[in-house]
Image: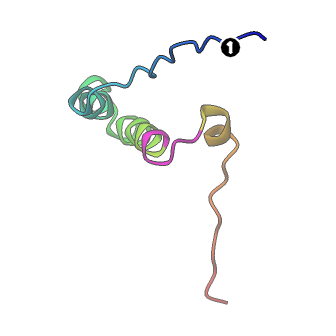
């Protein structure tokens, strides 16, 4: 009989909360155009809040609802 040797699992590296907040706020500090800064911040917030991949965000379409 062979005895299976368990390999130690490493935990994923996760950024600190303050680093993530600084990253999300960075576009408002760096971008000169306020519209571009808002767009970039919204993209970062969407990525971190939902956990979606960049490719999913790129292909995401906003549904348009009508009262009619």
Residue 21: image location, x then y, percent:
26, 34
Instruction: Locate residue 11: give its quadrant.
Output: top left
Residue 56: image location, x then y, percent:
66, 40
Query: Toward the viewer: 64 or 8?
Result: 8
Within 10 Å of disc 1 (Cα), the crowding (few <14, some 14-19, many 20+) is few
Vertical placement of residue 5 versus 23, above or below:
above
The residue shown at (57%, 12%) is: 7
The magenta region covers 47-52
The residue shown at (47%, 45%) is: 46
Of the 4 image quadrants, the one containing the N terminus is top right
Residue 31: image location, x then y, percent:
32, 26
Classify residue 24 as left or right of residue 3. Answer: left
Does 17 appear in magenta?
no
The residue shown at (37%, 38%) is: 41
The residue shown at (62%, 11%) is: 5
* SS for dot 1: loop
Predominant secondary structure in magenta? helix
Tell me the residue that label 1 is attached to.
4
The image shows a total of numbered marks equal to 1
Of the 4 image quadrants, the one containing the C terminus is bottom right
């Amino acid at each position: 009989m062979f005895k299976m040797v368990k390999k130690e699992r490493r935990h994923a590296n996760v950024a600190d909360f303050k680093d993530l907040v600084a990253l999300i706020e960075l576009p408002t500090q760096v971008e000169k155009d306020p519209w571009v800064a808002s767009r970039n911040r919204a993209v970062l917030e969407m990525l971190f809040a939902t956990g979606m991949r960049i490719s999913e965000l790129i292909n995401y379409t906003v549904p348009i609802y009508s009262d009619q």
